Amino acid sequence: MRQQGYYSLVQFCPDPAKAEVANAGVLLFAPGHRFIDVRMSRVNERIHRFFPEAKLDVKRLNSTKEAIRSRIQLEGAQFQSVADLSAFILTRFDQMRLTPPRSIMVSHPEKTLVALFKELVGGERTPRQKPEPVYPEVDRLFTSPQMRPHVVCGKSVVVPVLGRQLEIPYSFKNGLLHLVKPYWFATSDAAITMGFEGQMLAKEPDEEGNTRKLTVLPRVKPLNKEKDLETKVVSIFREYDVRTVTETEVPAYLDEVVQLVAAY
């Protein structure tokens, strides 16, 4: 049965003075169906597209969207009329705001909410799948239950002097802070850059005073254009005093890691 309903857009507004917004979600209230729910964008692609030059705090954005969703779940069941919805809309949610309620006839509220979201916020791309690890067997060890208490996965470190960040898939301590980076190499230039970064990291301890040691597990892309690229990569890292573990050395290295962690 068609019943009177109301919807409100959830909008991101970084500067109230300019009143520029990007739709981030839709709230639907259908009192005749005893329905109220909000659908939020899972990613912030639309916001990035509307405000490409804005420095967005993604964590803050996501927590604000979650706060709106939680409030609806906690308080929405008590809404009796559009006046209750209007009162809720006046609540401040950081840089997010809700538009005044707009009238809509509703037969199937769940389907209506999906249709409104698709029309007013837009479809969303499927989140990217996690890329295949450079060395699956290395990933299996470092993410295993036995290693989980000792390993930090997905660490980002700032390289001294250069000031740029280097992504470290795995790190663990054993006197030294071991930074382990499997990496696909297409050119030797990438090894020069990473070798210098490893050298800088070794010269300056981290904020907790740990001496750092970069270990690179290189693999060479099959279609690379440089002859003997793996040999070049290993030679370059040797010049920078950065340890390399080649493909044939990986099994022994994994045994070594287990022993290092057990001994610490």
Image (cartoon, rainbow, N blue to C red):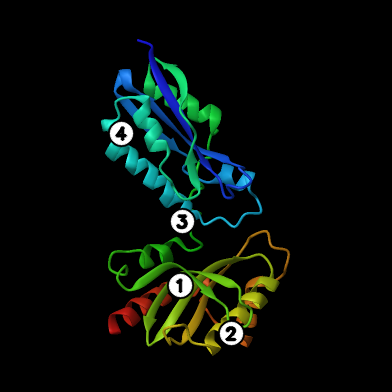
Residue 235 in picture, x, y percent from top left: 64, 82
Q: Position of residue 80 (x, y in %)?
A: 29, 26
Q: Residue furthest top?
A: 1
Circle 2 packing at 10 Å, graded few (<14), some (14-19), many (20+), is: many
Q: CA distance from mark 3 to mark 1?
A: 37 Å
* 33 lies above or below 168: above
Instruction: Answer whether residue 86 is visible to the viewer in this image.
Output: yes
**Closer to viewer: mark 1 or mark 2:** 2
Residue 234 seen in this snapshot = no
Q: Amino acid at mark 2?
A: Met
Question: Which comes sooner in the sequence, label 4 or label 1?
Answer: 4
Circle 4: residue type: Gly
Q: Answer above or below: position of 59 versus 160.
A: above
Q: As rendered, which of 17 and 186 lies closer to the eye?
A: 17
Q: Which one is earlier in the sequence, the residue at label 4 or at label 2? A: 4
Looking at the image, is mark 3 or mark 1 nearer the viewer?
3
Image marks 3 and 1: residues in contact by CB distance under 8 Å = no
In space, the residues marked 1 and 2 are separated at their CA atoms by 25 Å
Q: Secondary structure at mark 2?
A: helix
Q: CA distance from mark 3 to mark 4?
A: 25 Å
The foreground one among 158 and 132 is: 158
53 left or right of 27 in image: right
Which residue does the numbered mark 1 point to in the structure image? 250
Element under disc 1: helix
Residue beneath disc 4: 76
Query: Looking at numbered disc 3 in the image, what kind of residue is underneath it?
Result: Lys
Q: Earlier in the sequence, mark 3 or mark 1?
A: 3
Residue on which disc 2 sits: 200
In the rendered structure, which disc, 3 or 2, sits on the residue that comes first in sequence? Answer: 3
Q: Which residue is denoted by mark 3 in the rendering?
A: 59
The answer to whether residue 127 is left or right of residue 17 is left
**Mark 1 Cα-neighbour bin, 10 Å: few <14, some 14–19, many ≥20:** some
